[in-house]
Structures are given as structure tokens and as C-alpha cells.
Image (cartoon, rainbow, N blue to C red):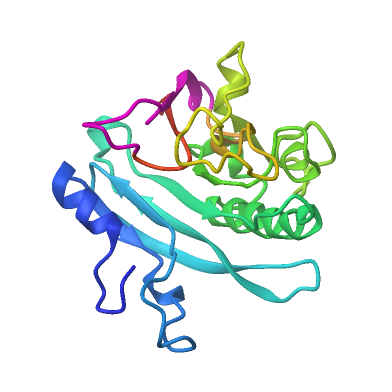
Amino acid sequence: MEPGGSTQARQLGNALGLTAVTAAELAGFDRYPQAEYWVVNAVLSRWPSRILRAVSLNDEHGHPTWRHVLLVRVERPESEGGSFIAAGTHLEHGLDRSVTRCAQMAHLVAEVSSEIGSHEQWRNELPAIVAGDFNAVPWSDEVRRATGTATPFVPGFVLVDAWDACGNPDRGDTWSTKNPLVPRRAVHPNRRLDYITTTFPRRRNCGSFQSCVLRGVDLVNGVQPSDHYAVLAEVDL
């Protein structure tokens, strides 16, 4: 996002015919007026969307960070299955920041679960789509607790990882030395850091993943789109 309000998400949305919403209110230009841009999360959809909340995620000390989660209601027509919640996020980076990411993930999961409703409502509602750069590998504490392979952050509420749910046989590294934009001397490349997930519990027969693949792996007109490969998933919603 640029100081004048222009966002990469809006440019992509205009080019692709999609609705783009961003967590613009969390940009820090008021604190850092010299900044040429600010990183905010966004959600793009083929249907109109409205922001439910944009929340700064707390660290292990309970202090809000510039990392955040953007929750939106995607207003899909009832004839096509009805509206649902989507959330985009980007957690703290750094090999030694797992404790901070655990706190941020705990806050994120709490926000998403409460937006869906009470514990009694989860099984009757469509699942939320939660996606983003978690900056954490699947066997990290933060991802294990989020996905229920360790004690969940919110009792009885977890995220289902599309890559694993589809039974992909390879690692699915999204930060890879095969990508020309990844530094050859990166401290720890070749990791899966980016995820698409659905929430569970959820309405019966809703939320199953049909496929999950990487995109942006190959050059497009000689250009590498990003230093992270994209994750593309098909979900029955």
C-alpha cells in the first residue's frame, strides 16, 4: 500500500475483475510518514466482500504488533452456497521467533473462531477460509497447535491444512532455492511457509479440499512473480 491509498491488491483486482479489500486502517504512515509503502493484508474475491475486522495480532507479551489478520465476509449469492468468512494474515518471520508466532497464531485463531460464532454454532456454519504466510514450517509449534496435531489454541477448534489434506507427496516448499528471487545464501531456504486452510468443526459435507498445488513456479514472460511460490487450493464450499 502506498501513502496515497493505491494498493497492489486493488491493481490486481482491477486487472482480474475481482473485488479487493485491504487492512488499510492498519497502515503505519502516521507513525512513519517517510515510508514509501506499507505491508497490509488483502482478500480478493469474485464476489463483493465487506470487512468484518482488521486486528493487530498480539505478541507473547500481549502487545499488539504490526502483523495482523484481515477478516472479511464474502457475499456469495445464496444460490451458489451463501456467504462465508475469509481471513488473510502474515505472521512474524525469523527462525527464532516461534514464541511470537505462537502468540500471534493463538490470537488469530481466537478472532476467527469468535467471528464464526459460539462453540455450539461452529458445526452448523460454513468454515472460514484462513490463508497467508505463516512464516512457519508444518512441524513448528505454532502450526501444530493451529492444526490440532498438538493442543489447540482454542479448545475444539482447528485449521485444516490444504496441502496435507490433499495428500501431496512432496514437501511443497514455497520459499525455495529453485526460485531465482530467493537469496542463494538465505539462512534457511527450502521450507513450506504459506498455507490455505479451512476451519473445523464446520457444517457437514462442507470444506473438503479437492486439490492443492503451487503456482508462480515458472517465469511469466521472463519475470518471476514473487520470492514465495503461491498456493492454489480448490475447496468444496
Q: Which percent across, then down, holds residue 213?
A: 45, 21
Q: Is residue 236 visible?
A: no
Say whether residue 21 is left or right of residue 137: left
Say whether residue 124 is left or right of residue 64: left
Say whether residue 222 is left or right of residue 1: left
Please identify the quarter of the rendering in which residue 151 is found: top right
- The foreground one among 57 and 219 is 219
Which residue is drawn at the image coordinates 60% and 20% (left, top)? 165
Which residue is drawn at the image coordinates 49% and 27% (left, top)? 207
Magenta-tinted stretch: 204-224
Reply yes or no: does residue 182 show up in magenta: no
Please identify the quarter of the rendering in which residue 46 is found: top left
Which residue is drawn at the image coordinates 58% and 28% (left, top)? 173
Image height of 109 relative to 181, above or below: below
Q: Name the dominant secondary structure of the magenta segment.
A: loop
Which residue is drawn at the image coordinates 56% and 37% (left, top)? 175
